[in-house]
Image (tube, rainbow, N blue to C red):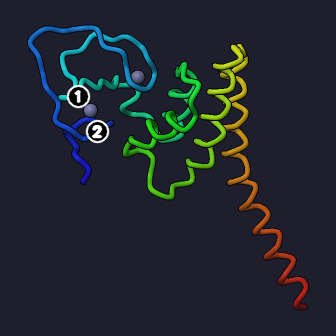
Amino acid sequence: MTNRNGCLICGQDLKYSEDYHKYSCYYCQQRISANATCVNNHFVCDQCHSMSGTELIETFCNNSLSFNPVEMANEIMESEKIKMHGPEHHFLVPAVLISAYCNLVNDPGKKTKIGIAKKRYIFPLSKRSVLRKKSLMWTSNGQK
Ligand SMILES: [Zn+2]
Ligand SMILES: [Zn+2]
């Protein structure tokens, strides 16, 4: 199903041209000179190509101008970096909601707010393992 050499977004074949043109990256919107897009004209820059799922969500939401969080979530989930049932969905939902809201009300604090959502997503994962260790200690003490 995953096509290594194909488009990151739709999986279709890439087409190469002799000349370089400026393309907008699908995720970060940067305009970059390149000679390859997919047959559906998607372009992803090298930087976004090497990002993790979480970084991709953050980059996309920071740069999107959309008012539609469902559309944004669907576009992000097209990427093979977002795994089926993967934990990054817990960041994806607040990120698209914050981005769409901030785009709508023209809130300049969008990147900061998405950054806070990312921290909240990453932090409980580490905290949870600490809590688990504590509860194990408590159980072993309780048995004595
Ligand atoms: Zn494509
Ligand atoms: Zn990019």
Determine if the C-beta at disc 1 is less than 8 A from ligand 1.
yes
Residue 20 location, quadrant: top left
| Residue 141: image tag | none
Determine if the C-beta at disc 2 is less than 8 A from ligand 1.
yes
Q: Are marks 2 and 1 in contact (CB under 8 Å)?
A: yes
**Image point (19%, 39%), residue name:** 5
Is 91 above or below relative to 87? Answer: above
> Badge 2 is on which residue?
10
| Residue 40: image tag | 1
The quadrant of the image that shows the N terminus is: bottom left
Of the pair 1 and 120, the residue shown nearer to us:
1
Q: Amino acid at mark 2?
A: Cys
Describe residue 26's horizontal placement relative to residue 33 as left or right.
right
Describe residue 94's horizontal placement relative to residue 15 as left or right.
right
Of the pair 25 and 4, the residue shown nearer to us:
25
**Image point (68%, 45%), residue name:** 121
**Image point (13%, 26%), residue name:** 15
Quadrant in which ligand 1 is drawn: top left
Marks 2 and 1, Cα distance to the nearest angstrom?
8 Å
**Mark 2 crowdedness (10 Å alpha carbons): few <14, some 14-19, many ≥20:** some
Is 79 above or below relative to 22? Answer: below
Q: Amino acid at mark 1?
A: Asn
